[in-house]
Image (tube, helix red, strand yellow):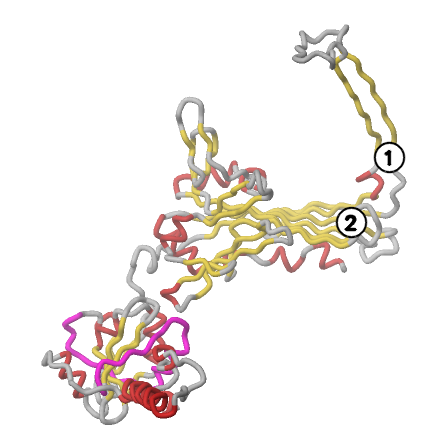
């Protein structure tokens, strides 16, 4: 370790307000060696959080910090004797005075032991997340990891963090700001301060990077040594042979006691310690596209004319837009490369790409081997899917697919069949004929048509 490490120079410069991941609750402790011995090294990061509306911002800044919001803050429901019930999501300043919202709950496990942290179900449902292992993912956006959990070797939570992009979307929908309060500690035990890497450092306190840093140098003996005292008291009026003994009021005549004291010490070495506290706001940008459904201002443009003219996605987001778009067929393999996407065939030249967002984008293949799609079917897709389609967008060529027009304009779907479906049907006929002729199976394993069709198509052959 070195001076930069103990002074936490890099860590105190970094803030979570511009980080990708934001801790909602953390208690991470790493150590090496015996805490009372030389060569001991430890590092701790603890963080607590709560979300507050604008009207309580001043109160929070003036009155609440690490002691009230940090990892020591108990997140639990409470039932008062007068009938008032404080639900677990309420952050209370005083009894029966909720001023904020807890985004992580604490759930003790009294019988099986330990404790669990629970991500606020309102946040989970609002962002439409599902749990996969230790991650919370959002299926509508390519199963991107939105929140993740980390546990220690005993299975107890030590960290829950969330991507800031999704956090601020949720905060904007509820008009809340997240307050973080965190503490970092680093410790190293050295034989002598004068012979260590910290020889020229002196104890000090300072305001730094919006937080408070303190550097301490103490002998290990002063930290863990010292005097101790013990007192024991007991009752003398209980007859152990009685079937149902009853103790009377306590007095000097029916009690006994003893006490002892001593000195503990002899620890060698010096404990060098750096501590840092900071409170920080995570602000939203007043835009909530996922939870509240605000308009996305960063949607792509698409080529709509043979001269390369483009129109914004927002202009095409109308069921009666009356336009089609043209795409290279490579868009299909690109989309199928994302988990959860499925290719379906309707006729010989039309099909659909079913995505995790729940939409089935109907397409047709034209004479130039390009995919043509009704513009509104693209414009209604989530932003990230639109960007994938936009990357394969080209100027009109080869007209709109005849079979697509027949279905969408004339309401007369073609009676043709996709060669992919015919291929698998032919395989089944061949397999049955082979079995009838020779009495054995042609294929030595079962083939799942639906799964195999995602890999066996004219688009993959083209690539």
**Residue labelled with disc 2:** 272
Q: Secondary structure at mark 1?
A: strand
Q: What residue sits right under mark 1 in the picture?
A: 264
Task: Please say if the residues under marks 2 and 1 sit with CB atoms less than 8 Å apart.
Answer: no
Q: Is residue 427 above or below residue 132?
A: below
Identify the image quadrant of the N terminus: bottom right
Q: Dot 2: few (<14), some (14–19), or many (≥20) neighbours within 10 Å?
A: many
| Residue drawn where x is 27% and y is 88% of the image | 422
Foreground disc of the pair 2, 1:
1
Q: Residues within 10 Å of mark 1 (few under 14, many from 20)?
A: few
Horizontal arrangement in the rendering, residue 459 relative to residue 156 (left or right):
left
Q: Is residue 332 left or right of residue 232?
A: left
Disc assigned to residue 10: none
Q: Position of residue 267 (x, y in %)?
A: 87, 43
Closer to the chain start, of discs 2 and 1, is 1
State how many labels appear: 2
Describe the element under mark 2 as helix, strand or loop. strand
Q: Position of residue 43 (x, y in %)?
A: 69, 53
Q: Which residues are magenta?
A: 319-348
Whether residue 328 is visible to the viewer of this picture, yes or no, is no
Q: Nearer the viewer, residue 396 or 235?
A: 235
Instruction: Say which of 374 and 13 sits in front.
Output: 374
Position of 30 compared to 221: left or right?
Answer: left
Q: Is residue 377 left or right of residue 39?
A: left
The correct choice, above or below, for 170 with respect to 239 in the image is: below
Q: Quadrant of the C terminus?
A: bottom left
């Amino acid at each position: 370790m070195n001076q930069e490490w103990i002074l936490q120079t890099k860590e105190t410069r970094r803030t979570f307000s511009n980080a990708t991941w934001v801790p909602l609750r953390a208690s991470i402790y790493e150590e090496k060696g015996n805490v009372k011995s030389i060569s001991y090294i430890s590092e701790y990061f603890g963080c607590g959080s709560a979300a507050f509306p604008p009207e309580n911002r001043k109160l929070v800044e003036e009155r609440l910090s690490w002691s009230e919001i940090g990892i020591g803050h108990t997140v639990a429901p409470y039932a008062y004797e007068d009938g008032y019930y404080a639900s677990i999501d309420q952050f209370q300043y005083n009894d029966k005075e909720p001023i904020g919202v807890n985004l992580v709950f604490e759930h003790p496990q009294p019988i099986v032991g330990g404790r669990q942290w629970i991500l606020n179900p309102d946040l989970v449902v609002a962002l439409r997340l599902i749990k996969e292992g230790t991650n919370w993912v959002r299926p509508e956006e390519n199963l991107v990891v939105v929140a993740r959990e980390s546990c220690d070797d005993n299975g107890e939570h030590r960290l829950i963090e969330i991507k800031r992009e999704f956090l601020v979307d949720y905060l904007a929908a509820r008009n809340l700001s997240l307050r973080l309060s965190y503490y970092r500690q680093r410790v190293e035990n050295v034989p002598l301060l004068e012979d260590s890497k910290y020889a020229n450092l002196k104890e000090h306190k300072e305001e730094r990077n919006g937080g408070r840093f303190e550097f301490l140098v103490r002998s290990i003996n002063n930290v863990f040594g010292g005097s101790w005292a013990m007192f024991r008291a007991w009752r003398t009026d209980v007859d152990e042979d009685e079937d149902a003994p009853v103790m009377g009021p306590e007095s000097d005549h029916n009690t006994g006691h003893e006490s002892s004291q001593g000195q503990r010490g002899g620890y060698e070495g010096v404990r060098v310690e750096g501590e840092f506290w900071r409170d920080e706001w995570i602000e939203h940008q007043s835009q909530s596209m996922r939870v509240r459904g605000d308009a996305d201002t960063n949607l792509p443009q698409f080529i709509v004319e043979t001269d390369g003219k483009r129109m914004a996605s927002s202009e095409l987001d109308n069921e009666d837009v009356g336009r089609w778009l043209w795409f290279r067929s490579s868009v299909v393999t690109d989309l199928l490369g994302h988990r959860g996407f499925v290719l379906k065939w309707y006729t010989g030249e039309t099909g659909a790409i079913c995505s995790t967002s729940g939409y089935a984008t109907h397409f047709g293949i034209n004479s130039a081997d390009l995919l043509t799609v009704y513009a509104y079917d693209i414009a209604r897709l989530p932003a990230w899917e639109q960007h994938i389609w936009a990357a394969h967008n080209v100027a009109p060529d080869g007209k709109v697919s005849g079979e697509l027009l027949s279905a969408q304009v004339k309401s007369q779907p073609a009676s043709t069949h996709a060669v992919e479906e015919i291929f698998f049907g032919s395989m089944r006929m061949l397999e049955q004929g082979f079995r009838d002729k020779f009495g054995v199976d042609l294929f030595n394993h079962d083939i799942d048509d639906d799964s195999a069709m995602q890999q066996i198509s004219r688009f993959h052959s083209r690539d």
